[in-house]
Image (cartoon, rainbow, N blue to C red):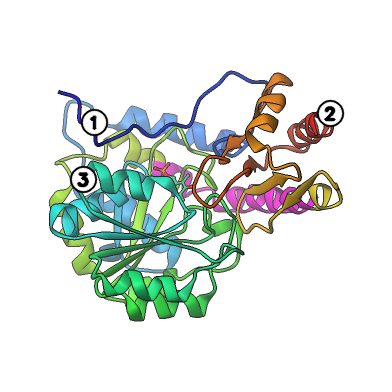
Amino acid sequence: MKNKLIEGYHSPQVAADVRLNTNESPYAPPPGFVDVLAEEVRRIAWNRYPDRGAAALREAVGAFHGVGSEHVFCANGSNEVIQSMLLAFAGPVGAAAVFIPTYQLHTHISNVTATPVITRSRLANFRLDMAEVEAACSEGPAVVFACSPNNPTGTVEDRADLARLVDLAPGLVLVDEAYGEFCQATVLAEAAASERLSVSRTFSKVWSLAALRLGYLVGAAALVTELERVALPYHLSAFAQAAGLAALRFPDEMRDRVARLVAERERLHAELSRRASVDVWPSGANFLLFRPHDGDGAGLWHRLLARSVLVRDCSGWPGLDGYLRVTVGTELEDDRFLEALDASV
Ligand SMILES: *Cc1c(COP(=O)(O)O)cnc(C)c1O
């Protein structure tokens, strides 16, 4: 029987010429990546189960961040990292805390794992409200979620706020850094040295590999051991492990793509800022949160789609009345978006 408590997570995949709705990279990974992977695929012993501990991949991810592999847990997207964390430490026996508006999957995966959710608000400027953080932490959550840069607002959390949050939290803190490479701020080094703070990252955005489904956590070795306990045996396929290793051989290309997107984000931000028709927020990620002056975000979403430009409609989310989120695309895609916007407001 269907569990009516759990509503699905929906980000509509509507056909459109310009798709700027799910924060994917507009750029493919380099051709060299596909060549290396094709070679590796030939070498896989397909009749055998993969390396259960994903040793080589964890080693390579660790080396990329300057930490030992015992601090790295790899999974099928950072969504599986979040799920593993909740299965291991929360579920029916411990709550999770979130500060909205933020990444909806923190709440959704909590619901799926029967984890009670403590929901508190952010400040009007979308920064963490430390009074709300204190209130949430006083309820004893087993896991506190933060997200920096925060999706969908783009807000880069203040370092001191995050440090204070870790002090206040009675249990674990997971900082979701899915967009970490798009800004300078990170608490990854602190996570490797901490018992309670951990960071999740993903190959989906900065590595241009949303199709792959690979993410990871950096945190205490003891935490990684607990996460391995709840992961299904052989959850990470030989193909995913090989693809992650192949991707990590092209870090300079990744940084080039990120630099181009950061420059394009700033251009798009400047373009939106000089329009009287919308308000736009600063962002440390590969997307921008904006709102039409008439407050009719849902209407604008439909008018943009009528011009074959798809953005994310956040206008119905609590705390985001009238807001839309646009992913930074190529210059050409962003110009198409701006043209459609000017014709729609
Ligand atoms: C896109 C995104 C992810 C990515 O999840 P994957 O399962 O790795 O694709 C994680 N966290 C946030 C905040 C995101 O926006």
Q: Residue at x 39, y 38 (%)?
A: 213
Q: Residue at x 42, y 80 (%)?
A: 164
Going from N to C along the chain, the mark reached first, 1 or 3, is 1
Q: Is residue 249 above or below residue 17?
A: below
- Foreground mark, 3 or 2? 2
- Disc 2/disc 1 C-alpha distance (Å): 41 Å
The verdict on label 2 being within 8 Å of ligand 1 is no
Q: Please provide the residue range marked out in magenta.
A: 244-269
The verdict on label 1 being within 8 Å of ligand 1 is no
Q: Does residue 286 appear to the left or right of 205 in the view shown?
A: right
Q: Does residue 18 appear to the left or right of 113 in the view shown?
A: right
Q: In this figure, which residue is indicated by the disc labeled 2? A: 343
Disc 1 to disc 3: CB gap under 8 Å: no
- Disc 1/disc 3 C-alpha distance (Å): 14 Å
Q: In this figure, which residue is indicated by the disc labeled 1? A: 4
Q: Is residue 171 above or below residue 328?
A: below
Q: Identify the disc placed on residue 113.
A: 3
Asked if residue 194 shows in the view, the reply is yes
